[in-house]
Image (cartoon, rainbow, N blue to C red):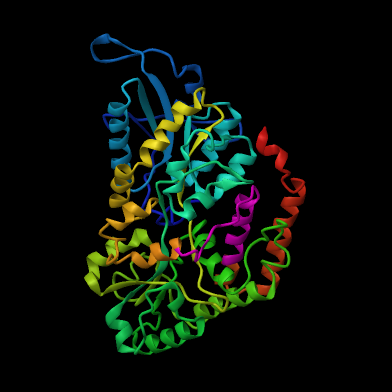
Amino acid sequence: MIGWAGRDTPHGGPRSAALDTVDAAGEVPWVPISRCSTGRLIPLALLCAAACSPSERTQRGGGVPDERVVIRVWAHSGQDAERRVLQAQAGRFDRAHPEARVELTLIPEGSYNDQVQASALAGDLPDVLELDGPFVAAYAWQGHLRPLDAIVPDTLVAELLPSIVEQGTYQGRLWALGAYDSGLGLFARRSALRQVGARLPTAPHEAWTAEELEGILAALAERDEDGAPLDLHLNYRGEWYTYAFLPALRSAGGGLMGHEEIRASGILDGPRSVLALSRLQSWIEREWVDPNIDDAAFVEGRAAISWSGHWDFRRYHARWGDDVVALPLPDFGDGMRTGQGSWVWAVTRAAADPARAADWIRFVLSREEIAAMTDANAAVPARPRVAETSALYGPDGPLRPLLDALEGGWAVPRPRTPAYPFATSAFQDLMEDVRNGEDIAAAARAAARLIDREIDDNRGYPPVSVTR
């Protein structure tokens, strides 16, 4: 993801500022940083790694040669709890596969895509790569990934959430799979909603209409000292905007790009998208939205409703206990929609033994390892069977509505196209215009033309590139 102020992902917590190379024992040595010819910051450990064959012998304790096959795995540096689980998983993988050893490298999320692209140019991608779900199509089209269809069992894929498989599929091929999905919705304080007579819609088909939410916000504002009862996480930047607010456009009958013909004009700048964006802008202009500069609007009680995701639940619950309730996003006129997509695992073209590299993916997608990770980060387990036994997502779990939205087909993936990295950047700029009170129709038209020009410059991203 593109980094934001205060938090680097809509799928986790604050990120480490350092790149960590982690061995199975959990040791994190210092890694120097250099610059490549493009000016990007590149860890020297990554630049020199090409000189070291994965089958090269290393020394174990006591000077005994270590002839295990090395599987190089890169992952984003997530919240502390996620890092601890990844380190433990590397150790458990090594013990379960005595013939192999995982070399785990953690990279800060804000610079992750730049690091990967620079390393791809240098011919130094790892065997297994973690990447953000909406970037799968771009990485596949660029020729960085190997399809998983032949190296991941169909029985495993069949057990996963439909949203997990959908996010990892591009042009009919499966390229990536994740151990968890993200959950997006509204978090609210029951007591505050009761005070204004608001109902609690816990199922997707019961979602508040946008007009109903506006009535609730107006009533809450009258009782609120600062009059700003809604937290839209405006302290966030980057990918948050597309992940969080594209569902509003889709719920209004609009969107970012077409599905059959990959174009933005007529969709992003269409009347339904403009209406949804204008409604969001009106909430800001009416001063119903807390600026949330300190990332504490909901925790401190300034906002009674927070437009947020699974990663915030634990800190919200720590402050308000069972007064916190998870609700579906509002219906902007064409049915409630929610976001989906999180970090996924893929095998790269650099993997000398793709089946061996896929052992890591099969391992971290086992029921036990999914449970370990989602217990740590509160994300939606990729396997519904794991979710059913989860304290958070089980039948009576507080986050069950987030799982129901994913399982019930209410979630919409961000456009699965190689144009997405550029399109999301343009949408983020458009959302800044929304925040700043600019003319929505004109700003949306300019963003759509910019995206279409990028698509034209790449000849529409012809599918032949996928097979390179």
Q: Magenta part of the protein: which range?
A: 408-431
Q: Residue 91 at x, y = what percent?
A: 28, 31
Name the image quarter holding residue 83: top left
Residue 160 in the image: above or below residue 32: below
411 drawn magenta: yes
Q: Nearer the viewer, residue 2 or 401?
A: 401
Q: Residue 57 at x, y = what percent?
A: 38, 12
**Quarter occupied by the C terminus:** top right
Tell me: 216 left or right of 418: left
Tell me: 34 left or right of 316: right
Q: Give the residue drawn at x 64%, y 38%.
A: 142
Q: Nearer the viewer, residue 377 or 175?
A: 175
Q: Is residue 296 visible?
A: yes
Q: How many marks?
A: 0
Name the image quarter holding residue 428: bottom right
Q: Give the residue drawn at x 46%, y 45%.
A: 157
Q: Residue 22 at x, y = what percent?
A: 34, 31
